[in-house]
Image (cartoon, helix red, strand yellow):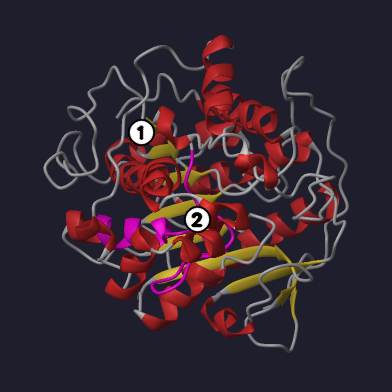
Amino acid sequence: FRSRYVTVCTRPFILNVEPVQKSFPLFHPRCSKASFKPIRGMPSDADVNSSPTAGSLTGAASSTAGFASLALLPQGSLSSAYSDVCGSTWPDSTQLPVVYHRSYNISFFGIEKLHPFDSCKYGKVVSALKKQGVLQEGQTVLPREASMDVLADVHTQDYLHKIHHHNFTIVQVTELAALSLIPNKLLQWRIVMPMKLHVGGTILATGLALERGWAINLGGGMHHASASHGMGWCPFDDIVLAVRRVRKAAGRRLVVLFIDMDAHQGNGVERDKLQLPVEDLHIIDFYNARIFPLDDEAKPAIDIAVELRSGAEDDEILGRLQAVLAVAANTLPRPDLVMYNAGTDVLAGDPLGRLGMTAAGVVQRDEIVWRWCRDVARAPVVMTLSGGYTRESAGVITGSIRNLFEKFNLAKDIA
């Protein structure tokens, strides 16, 4: 495939996408609203509202199209299929498909601060969104922690035994050696149980996306975990668990597109795609090619891989993203569902991601993906937060979600 934006290099599975040179306005999530120019290659809102074309990957949406119009199932139809991961009654139209539990936030007598990961950013995001009026009290949906039976749909019994009984396995996942000295019951309570809530949240959000057209889990995105191994603060593969559950609930093998924009290769999801295997799961993975996990064995699972250089900035990453989405629309099967892993470890100064995006760039990145889902793929989208290791991460997530609510009128876009 060749266009003025994209060329495919000779290495299999890797796209050499030449960056589109473009400048983006600055954005500060605490003091200003984002205002973006129309995205090159995508219809503007005016185009969408005036176009009669709908239903093709390269066509615009109809005049009535919002995310609610993308819902595949009637509201409430999945309540019984997801009762084991829903922490209250099935959400009605007064609640938004935004999933959160206060126990997502992991604090363990300060030991968690020995790792650069901000394990309490989720609560900061929710608090800020409520202060800014994006979310109201009682609008979020409460998840329930994934049970052993739920986890066993992907993970091996041997691994589940280790993560629940062996401190060393938890140390491997969290990269915190000090946890080896803590009684296992405390680790289960303060580390493993919150992680299982994140899993329940991603599974639940995916079901809600089928009914509402969109959903956000204010956590999750544990893309390094595979069936028999966890790493990088990812003990469980919530992505593949959610894919398998939503297919069972829908009663058919939905075509799922996983767009991974975290700075690290999503090797756990990729390994599970190959080894379980998981069919009709297509993967677009943007990652810094020179950092963890450097998992060459997992790369054959990627449909479109974009290997970034350290320090890559907004113009390069956003230009390549737009080009890749154009390629995906022409070469990949139409998705029934898009799962979007919106890591903020792409920010400049992140000690682990080592990329160079600004807050404005991350906000526009998320808008580009959501707009493509609505206007081009015409598929429901579920977003997870994944990695982010700077103090600015929570504020950038807040600004991006606020922008999505404003640009797509999510608070009023009810199925």
**Which quadrant does the N terminus fall into?**
bottom right
Residue 33 visible, this orientation? yes
Residue 228 lies within the magenta run:
yes
Q: Residue at x 27, y 72 (%)?
A: 157
Q: Nearer the viewer, residue 65 or 342?
A: 342
Residue 60 visible, this orientation? no
Q: What separation in Å lies between label 2 and label 1 (alpha carbons)?
A: 27 Å
First-in-chain label (2 vs 1)? 1
Residue 347 lies within the magenta run:
no
Q: Quadrant of residue 175?
A: bottom right
Q: Percent position (x, y) of residue 235?
A: 45, 59
Q: Quadrant of residue 311?
A: bottom right
Q: Which residues are magenta?
A: 219-246
In this picture, residue 287 sits left or right of residue 221: right
Q: Which element type, helix, strand or loop, lies under badge 1?
A: helix
Which amino acid lies under the numbered mark 2 shown in the image of this protein?
Answer: Met
Q: Residue at x 24, y 32 (%)?
A: 87
Q: Percent position (x, y) of residue 51?
A: 51, 39
- Asked if residue 277 is positioned above or below residue 44 in the image, the reply reads below
Image mark for residue 222 = 2
